[in-house]
Amino acid sequence: MGYPFPYAPPGQVIGLLGGSFDPAHEGHAHITREAIKRFGLDRVWWMVSPGNPLKTHGPAPMASRLTRAREVMQHPRVEVTDIEAHLGTRYTAQTLAALRARYPGVRFVWLMGADNLAQFHLWQDWRQIMETVPLGVLARPGQRISARMSHAATLYAPYRISGRQSQLLGQAPAPAWCFVNVPMVDVSSSAIRAAGKWSAQSGRGDTRP
Ligand SMILES: Nc1ncnc2c1ncn2[C@@H]1O[C@H](COP(=O)(O)OP(=O)(O)OP(=O)(O)O)[C@@H](O)[C@H]1O
Ligand SMILES: O=C(O)c1ccc[n+]([C@@H]2O[C@H](COP(=O)([O-])O)[C@@H](O)[C@H]2O)c1
């Protein structure tokens, strides 16, 4: 399976980090490195989204976001992709169904920052996602409590793997989720945009801190 779909043999554990990446920043790179370590992942694929269904503003063009993401994330075990644009999917449940059909035997783990767990119950078919793939959640500044108190965390409390056992997540049958309290990096794409360091039209910008 070639471009735009990375190769993955059956048995590999692939972390998927979906995001707008508008623009990508050190917070994304940091949680990716932590996820590889803490969840014992073979690889991580960034999936630069054609557009988050819950966000009202349109993101910068895909090409600019991909270019920036590849500058920010350079790691031998990470691929930056625009898979969803090629699959024609926007909703995560649809993306996961398409990927599982294309990669039989590959184990996918959905990765997210704690802010996304707090909102997860608003996603389309979120319970189906939960019942299909393990979920790896990484701490984010100001979001640890809301994530822990969230609807998803409460409903699926019996399926939580403790942070100390995070290495089990990749092989765990769904539903399974794990919150890891990693060191936090206080950066967001919205703060970078608000500081005028990323132009939504062209995607060109200076994202140096
Ligand atoms: N600093 C961070 N710490 C932990 N997780 C993060 C951080 N930044 C982004 N993430 C996570 O990365 C994924 C993609 O995030 P996204 O591309 O929306 O960036 P963002 O900084 O959250 O953007 P915005 O500020 O526009 O909402 C999400 O799961 C999000 O929770
Ligand atoms: O499927 C959904 O309903 C859904 C709702 C909100 C967000 N998502 C996905 O969550 C990921 C993070 O989105 P974002 O915009 O917060 O970076 C990205 O892959 C989105 O497609 C998915």
Image (cartoon, helix red, strand yellow):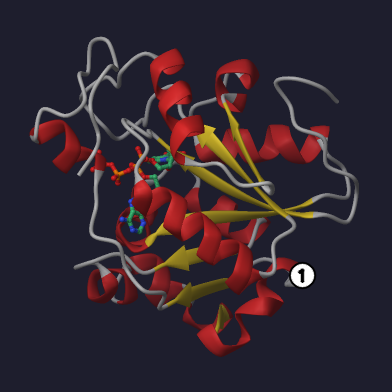
Residue 140 higher or lower than 187, as above or below: below
Q: Looking at the image, which residue sits at the far top?
A: 202
Say if residue 162 shows up in the picture: no
- Residue found 69% across the figure and 38% down from its top: 97
180 relative to 184 in the view: left or right: right
44 relative to 26 in the view: left or right: right
- Residue found 48% across the figure and 51% down from its top: 126
- Residue found 70% across the figure and 21% down from its top: 4
Front residue of 9 and 73? 73
- Res. 19 image quadrant: top left
Task: Please provide percent x and percent y for residue 166.
Answer: 60, 79
Task: Please provide percent x and percent y for residue 123.
Answer: 40, 45
Residue 173 higher or lower than 95, as above or below: below
Task: Please provide percent x and percent y for residue 112.
Answer: 45, 55
The quadrant the C terminus occupies is: top left
Q: Secondary structure at mark 1?
A: helix
Neighbours of disc 1 within 10 Å: few (<14), some (14-19), many (20+):
some
Q: Amino acid at mark 1?
A: Gln
Front residue of 5 and 184? 184
92 relative to 15 in the view: left or right: left
192 relative to 62 in the view: left or right: left
- Residue found 86% across the figure and 25% down from its top: 1
In the rendered picture of this protein, how many numbered marks are placed on residues?
1
Classify mark 1 as within 8 Å of ligand 1 or not, answering yes or no.
Answer: no
Say if residue 52 shows up in the picture: yes
Q: Looking at the image, which residue sits at the far left?
A: 195
- Res. 109 image quadrant: bottom right
Task: Please provide percent x and percent y for residue 105.
Answer: 88, 50
Q: Which residue is mark 1?
A: 171
Q: Looking at the image, which residue sits at the far front?
A: 208
